[in-house]
Image: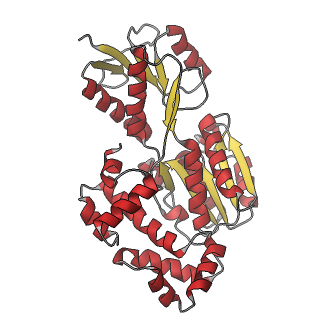
Amino acid sequence: MRQKRIALLLDIKSDYEHGIARGVIRYSKEVGSWKLFGRGFTLGEFLDINQWEGDGIIAIIHGHTEAEVLLKKGVPAVDVAGAADYGVSRVTNGDYDSGAVAGKHLLACGCTNFAYCGAKDKYWSLRRFEGFKEKLASTGIALDYFELPLEVWENPENSSELRNFIVNLKKPVGIMAANDTIGVRITDLCKEEGIVVPHEVAVVGVDNEDVLCELSDPSLSSIPCDCERIGYEAAMVLDRTIAGEQTEPVSIEIPPKTLVLRASSNTIITDDEIVRKSVQYIHENAFMGINVSDVVRNASVGRRALEKRFREALATTIHEEIKNTRLQKAVHMLLESTIPAAVIAEACGFSSPQRFHAVFMKEFGKTPMDYRAGK
């Protein structure tokens, strides 16, 4: 069988690119007939894509100039960035869903003011904003919007426009940053201005670049992309295109993973002291098998009254808060360990492995083990 020569146009410097590369490599090993070329000592080197001869390309396309170069070659290509529609197949993060996840989380934090900080002229940023905005639409809450070109966000000097925007926001406020770089710029600026994160400004980013998120002060909550699955699916689309089975460009969005909670949004913003203390009780005891009745007893108010106060303060229910707290820990244990699912179920407070399986399936549409495997 002739080997297919595949170019992997990634710098392989960020967690996002590492994940994409892992997915492509996994697919290439499964099919057994790919040879990968790209930037990096582990790949067959090429100096100039214009001079490279091969069968297909998987690329992070940053702009129209790069897209034109790829299109001119006439070689099947798949974009894994989603900055714009360049006329080639795209396999990207579910950016609309990422926005919805951020909205749900910040609503659960009790935020009543919201803002979005985006990257100008980037389709993925626009889609994240649309998902965020739609999640908030039913509440009737106003949403402030601010954007800068990505290269400005990546400059370590914060702009005066951003400073004015953050300072003048009505607080407390929940901010979704289009990516982690933007999120860190926001937390840095808040620290400079004496604005307390998360109690005055709660911030959530996207991509979960873990080193960057942990370097943020305070550490940045973020929504991970399922990068390995993006890379694997992109490789599959490319293989079908090379074989002539896929003749028109396709656009596939891979759902994001569960939000990783860190200090930048680990707060409950509410004037209702009973609700605040009840949430604290849940976070401290959810893994010990508590139920709604336990929370009600601890609050020393009637169940109906407490449920009503939860809905008014946090737009959620007591049961949902318990469930989400358990699932968040379960997801972390699945991704960061090899502990069996039955042990995770017990550690996270589920009544049985079967109950854990059912709740996980309903929430994520896949089993805990499939989630761990990135399927």
Residue 143 spot, x, y in % from top left: 73, 55
Q: Is residue 278 left or right of residue 126?
A: left
Q: Position of residue 112 (x, y in %)?
A: 69, 66
Q: Quadrant for residue 157, please give it.
A: top right
Asked which quadrant contains residue 301, the reply is bottom right
Residue 123 x, y percent position in the rendering: 63, 35
**Quadrant of the rendering where the C terminus is positioned:** top left
Can you say whether 306 is above or below 353 in the image?
Answer: below
Vertical relation: 243 (above or below) 372? above
169 to 83, vertically: above or below: below
Asked if residue 221 shows in the view, the reply is yes
Answer with left or right where residue 359 lies relative to residue 72: left
- 340 to 79, vertically: above or below: below
Residue 197 seen from this side: no
Q: Position of residue 333 (x, y in %)?
A: 32, 59
Q: Is residue 277 left or right of residue 31?
A: right
